[in-house]
Amino acid sequence: MKKILLIATAFSIAAGAPLLAMASPSGDLQAFRSYFQKRFPNVKMADFKDGIYSIDTARRDAWLEFEDFAPAYEDGVALGKELFNKPFKNGKTYASCFENNGIGIRQNYPRFDAKSGKIVTLEGAINKCRIDNGEEKLGWKKGKIAAISAYMSFTSRGNKVDIKVPNDPRALAIYERGKRHFYAKRGQLNFSCADCHVYQSGNMARGNLLSPAIGHITHFPVWRKKWAKKSEAKGKRGPTRGFGTIQRRYGGCNKQVRAKPFKAQKDEYNALEYFHTYMSNGLEVNGPALRQ
């Protein structure tokens, strides 16, 4: 771990400054893509949607075999579909709250809402829909909200991530906040998101292969073996036991570098999700997915 930290620090000084210096979202995106194309010259840009399975042949073969049978996330997607179509007490469903009845729209979230000046994530929109229809909101990071989000992602497979950063000072400020979070070091280990998933992507950290940041967001919510085992150890074996949203993952990453996590769906993580998702613009949605 200490060796990785030293290497990551050196790379962040040498390679991080040019990325941080970019003056516009479109310029940042171009630099981001260029970096990963040079780092992984044998990987097609479109394949980065597959995370670590785009850069490791052996893991990819095992993953494809898993996908060919009965993926562990299938029951969660089925539950998400059931919940999505189940009427609220007033007779309406989630479909009434979204464009295109909520089908095939995952690629448009998170989005900047000009009226409120805030970022609206998909999970945020799901809970707003519930509140607007007289229902209590769901927990943010796992369980039913992850199942509903997973179903909505499943209906969006093949659609390309298309996040807009309008020429609005408020949107640009949120984008910059997310970018600062992505590159800022934190915690006792003094790591940034970029240390692991940009400069050290493709390398090993203990038994884990560090995934490229580009394409990260395309497959969320994800079903993780680690999360499933944790749930099962607590006696929870339902269809959502291994599911989690991207902001659940953010919290876990912060804990891993011994930093205090931010609260899910608050401004800090929403800004990070906005920047993080924008960096995958043009890649296909393929969630939910299995990840390590």
Image: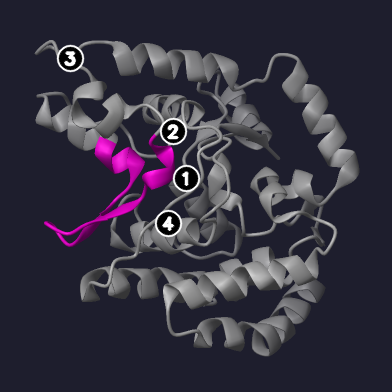
Q: Which residue is mark 2?
A: 142
Q: Which residue is mark 1?
A: 248
User: Which residue lies at the image location 73% right of the left edge and 23% below the top edge?
Assistant: 67
Residue 88's tag is 3
Question: Dots 2 and 1: beta carbons under 8 Å?
Answer: yes
Q: Amino acid at mark 1?
A: Arg
Residue 200's tag is none
Mark 3–mark 2 distance (CA, rounded to whole Å): 20 Å
Rendered image quadrant of residue 117: bottom left
User: Which residue lies at the image location 70% right of the left edge and 14% below the top edge?
Assistant: 70
User: Which residue lies at the image location 13% right of the left edge and 10% below the top edge?
Assistant: 91
Q: Nearer the viewer, mark 1 or mark 4?
A: 4
Say left or right for 135 vs 69: left
Say left or right for 146 vs 20: left
Circle 3 — which element?
loop
Rendered image quadrant of residue 105: top left
Question: Dots 1 and 4: beta carbons under 8 Å?
Answer: no
Q: Which of the two discs, 4 and 3, labels the residue nearer the N terminus?
A: 3
